[in-house]
Each structure stands twice: as C-alpha cells, then as structure tokens.
Amino acid sequence: MHRMRALVFWLVLAASAPLAAQTVHADNRDIDDDRPKAVPAQDSDHADADVRHSDGENGKDGDEDDQEHAAPVTAIVVSARRLDIARTGVDAGLGATTYELHNETIENRPGGETGSVGSILAQAPGVTLSSSGPQVRGSNAVQVRINGVIVPEAIADPADRLSSRLAESTRLITGTLPAQFGFTPGGVIAVTSKNGLYQHGGQAELFAGTRGAFEPAFEWGGSADSSSLFASGSLESGNARVADIVGPSAREVRHEIGGLAFVDHIIDDENRVSLISGGSRERRKIGPTDLPAGVDQTGNVFAVGTMQHSTGPLTLQASLFAARAGDSARFATDDRERRTSLGTQVDSSLGIGDNNTIRAGLLLTRSTSREDHAGSVRRTSLGAYLQDEWKPDPRLTVNLGLRGDWLRRVGDSPEAEPRGSVVWQSGSGFSAHAGYARYASAPPLGEERPGLSLPDETDDYFDAGVQQKIGAVTVGLDGYYRRARGLIEAHATPGSALPQAFAFSRGRFHGVEASLTYARGPLSVWANVSVSKSQGRTLIGGAGLLSPAGLVAANRRWVALAQNRPLTGSGGVGWRSGKLNLSADVVAGSGAVRTLDPSAPNGARAPAYANLGVAAVYHMDLLDRPLDLRLDLTDLTDVHYLTSDAANLEGGWTRRAVGRSLLVGFEQSF
C-alpha cells in the first residue's frame, strides 16, 4: 500500500509539471568528485581501462590542462555537483551494458578530439563505424542524449554530427535498456557536456595532416557567480574517394563547420536552468562517377532548454526542444528534404526509503518532413514510462518497468513495452545481470515511399552478462539475442537526399562480447572481442530495390544486414611518463558485406581488416600557459578496406578507409 501511494503521488505530480522533471537517487556518490560518474554502481559496465588511467588519487590522468583550469571549490560548485549527481540518477542504465569514456582519455588516444561523438566509441565492444555513424550490435537504431535530454528527431545521425569536444564523458548504453529509453533497440549514446562552472579558460587548437586534413578549433568555459558558459566550435576539411554502383571512383572533398554552447544557471541548492544550442553544416563535393559531378550537403540547428528541481528524494527535469535540419543533393537533378521537430521531455525520480526508487516520465514530439518532389508529412509521437527499482537484498537490485508509445499519432492504440532486469553484486568484485526489454519504433518520418505503409517494428531483446574485478584487472562477458518483427532498414541512393525505408518481415541479432581491462600506475591496457550475427528475411516494400531474382532470394533465406560483422575486435595500450603520453590502439574485424551477384543480395563479404594507430602527446608550458603538442599516425598498415558498398540492399556510396594518415597539431590554453 505504501508503494502504491507513492506511485499515485508521482503520477499526480508529473501530470501537473509545466515542463519536465528529473528525479534523483544519490547512489552514495561523493559530491566533491570532479567528474560525477554517470554510470550507477549497479550497472554492469564494460568501462575502458583508459577511463581509470589515473594517478591513483582523484581519477585524473595527470593532464596539466585540467589542473590549470580547474574552478575553485565554492558553494555554487558544490551545489552544481549535487545537482549533477541528481541528474545522473534520472537516466540510470540499470541492468543494461554500459561503456564509458572521459574526455582526458579521448585526448590522449590516436585522433584525439578530432572525431565525432560516435567515432570515439569505435573501441567499444560490438561497435562498428560506417558513413552514417556508429552501428551498435548490428543495428542503426541508436539514440543520442545530451545531459539526459534527447537530441531532436529532425537531426539525422546526430552521433556523426556532434563533435567530441562538447563531451566531458560519453556513455554507450546497450542491451536491455530501462523503460525510460524508447525507440532505440540498438542503444543510447549519453553525453555529459563540459561545463564552464568546472573549468575556466579555453583552448585554441589546430590540426593538419595528409589527405587534405585541416581542422582549426576552439573551446572556452567560464562562470560568473552562479551562471556559467561553455562553447566550442570547429572547421574540418579532408578528402577521400567514393563510387556509385557502376561508375568509377571519384574524389570527395569534405568541409564541415559546427559548434555548441551550453549555458547553465544555478538558482539555489535545489533548482537550476540550462540551455544547449548547437548546429553544424557539412558539404561534400563529389567528382563525376556514373553521375555527373555534384554536391551532397547537410545542415542542422537545435536548442534545448531545461529546468531541474531536486529536493530530498525527488528530482524532476523538464525540457523543451526544437530543431531544424535539411539534406540536399545536386547532381543530375536537385533533391532536397527539410525536417523540423519540437516537443518536451519530462523525467523524474523519487526515492522511497533506502531501497526503492520510482522513475517516470514522458516524451512528446511533433515532427514534419518536407521533400521537394513528395510534399510534406507530419507525425505526433508520445511515449510515457513508469519503472520501479528496488533492492530486496543489499546485493540484489531489481528494476521493473512499463513503457507505452504512441508512435504515429496520439489517438492510436499504444505499443506496450514491458522491461525488466536483475543485477547481482557480491562483495568480492563479481557482478551479474540479466534482463528482457520490448521495443517499438516507426519508420523514419518521410522515408516511406508514396502509396506504401510499412508496419511498426517490434523487438524482443534478451541480455545477460557477468563481470569480475581482480585487483587492477577487470574481465567481462556479455551475451544477447534480439528478435524483430517488421525490422526497419533504409536504402540510400547516390545522388538523392532522402533514403527510402523498407522492412524485413523478420530480423534476428545475437552475439557474445568479451572484454578485459588493466590499469595500474602509468600503464593501461584494454581489449574487446565480439562475435555476432544480424540478419533479415522476407522483404516488405523492397520491390524497387532488387531484381526479381534478388527478391526471390531475400524471401527464401536469411539476408545479412549491411552492418553485420561476424567478428570484431579492438584494443590498445596507454603509457604515461612525466609530460609525455604514448598510446596505440587497433580496430579489426570481418570485412563489409557486399553484393557481387544480383540474385544473392548482401551475399558476399570483403576481406577482413585491421586498423592500427599510434599517438604521442607532450604537455609543456608556453608563456605560463599549458601547451599540448601531438602527433598521430592512423591506419599504419595502409589498408584501404571497404566500409560500405553501393550495390548492397542498403545502398549508399561505396567507401573505403582513407589509408595511412599523419596528423600533427597543438592545443594552446588561454
């Protein structure tokens, strides 16, 4: 009866909230820690060894930039950290598999912060990269959140659009996600942004290298009284080679400009408001293939305003968001799509005693897609969830939840999505988790062809794993199985701005991931191996994508998805000596899926590959300000391995790795 009264109380409170709210369960974190940990202690995480690359005291990596620009600990800073901890309790990934990287880890790895939010996760188990961003466990369905708030739907492939410079920490949450995460069977990339309240000053950066690589960038953070600002921006240039289905390869010249600003104001110990605003614009000029020379261009801008209230056991976080984005292709003909989204997200958490936390919330989005030759379409989606985390035993945590999603319009019948997980933690460093989750999602807005209505996708996801910590060594093993009905995929046509959605009547994904990390003193080592399979069968809406023989084959047998990689592995080593940081990492795997015979779609595979990179970062002072000098070498074996094939069922441009590259640069603090 006590728990029922608590649930009723929360529902009434959430319904009356004007914005959105976030709840908090402190999870016994120390509010004086520099980086509030985003991963709850109960999570079965495959944390990278480099995350623990520290001096043994405060979890820092010895980077003098961090120490030089650290903000003094004041009452405002303490309040902000307390609110940060409360926010992490709202988007807890209990029962899921979580992999976390911190900014200082990224800075000392090959490539540093020159990549996107998605690209820095290439070392995570089960992740592969393609031209459209990260693929997680064979799935494109990955959601991005910044400070717990979803990046609006209008922005396609946000993980590939956001710079890694904005992130203080980045988590990949996959497996059986709690009920608060909707529409995303692949996983969630949860970013905690940098904050001017914790760092004062900025950095001017310049990187240049082979293959036309050139990237000036900056970031700055600061605060006055209880208000703070962090801003970053970059301009990227580079070139590669691409091809369409039948034409010769052509040179592709890429330019991208992007930036983000985060403003935060602490009202008092229990309340704060914040605003995130950002955008990017990318232009790819492609020489003649079977198509004449042309230009692919994308652009987006978004804003998210958030209010957080945390008092005692209750945390509420409410957000309003809006975004506008567009894609255009100018080749033989002009093609353009424009998208808008606006909505609200509310999340909350209520602690009941020491052993029970209730979480609930909603997400309401209104989206529009306008395409030059097909008019406009609109969709109003609503998702709501309720979940209960409780500890019947100090070593056992149970999380049960239910989510309801109105995918296309609020008046339809909702998709019911039960979720549940259990986590066991012994006192000897051993932990285990197991869970089940139901997911539901609709085809991307505007990608259904006229006259064709694809079914909504529903997935049943099972996941279980174990982890053992023995001194400085952590080993983990995780297995999953996902069964999909109405599996949504998309076919991209070179020279067209808008992909075409199609579906498989059935889909199946399964795999096993093993991880090992070691961190002690100046040395850190990590390794991951993933064995997996992702397939679909019986096409829905694919009549225009394959030959008659290909359609027959796709309906009679299981077809490998373009993102399927049966075997992948990653690993690396980091070593620190005084002011010098050295690191090396490798990503290897099965070759990309290919279509060599039209009657056997996605029936072949390119050769396996291995990509080795090394980096050296030297920390010094110039005019009494920290200066980092870096040298990066990537793809030392110079293997131009295939990353995507235009002839595949999923289409797109044929792309290969750019090969051996040299990058030199500096980061000057001011």
Image (spheres, helix red, strand yellow):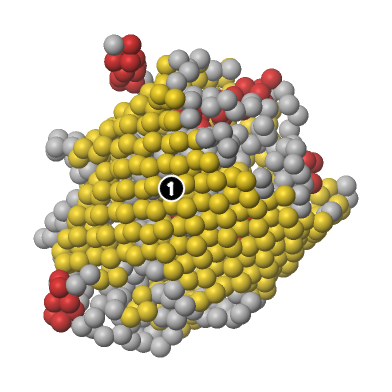
Element on which disc 1 rests: strand
Q: Is residue 335 visible?
A: no
In the image, residue 444 lies at what x, y percent?
Answer: 27, 54
**115 or 426, nearer to the observer:** 426
**294 or 104, nearer to the observer:** 104
Q: Is residue 74 visible?
A: yes
Q: Is residue 323 left or right of residue 601?
A: right
Rendered position, 501 above or below 391: below
Residue at 47 percent across and 67 percent down: it is: 568
Q: Residue furthest right?
A: 623
* Residue 286 quadrant: bottom left
**559 or 183, nearer to the observer:** 559
Q: Residue furthest left?
A: 451
Q: Is residue 597 left or right of residue 630?
A: left
Query: What residue did someone put label 1 on?
Result: 465
In the image, residue 539 lies at what x, y percent?
Answer: 17, 67
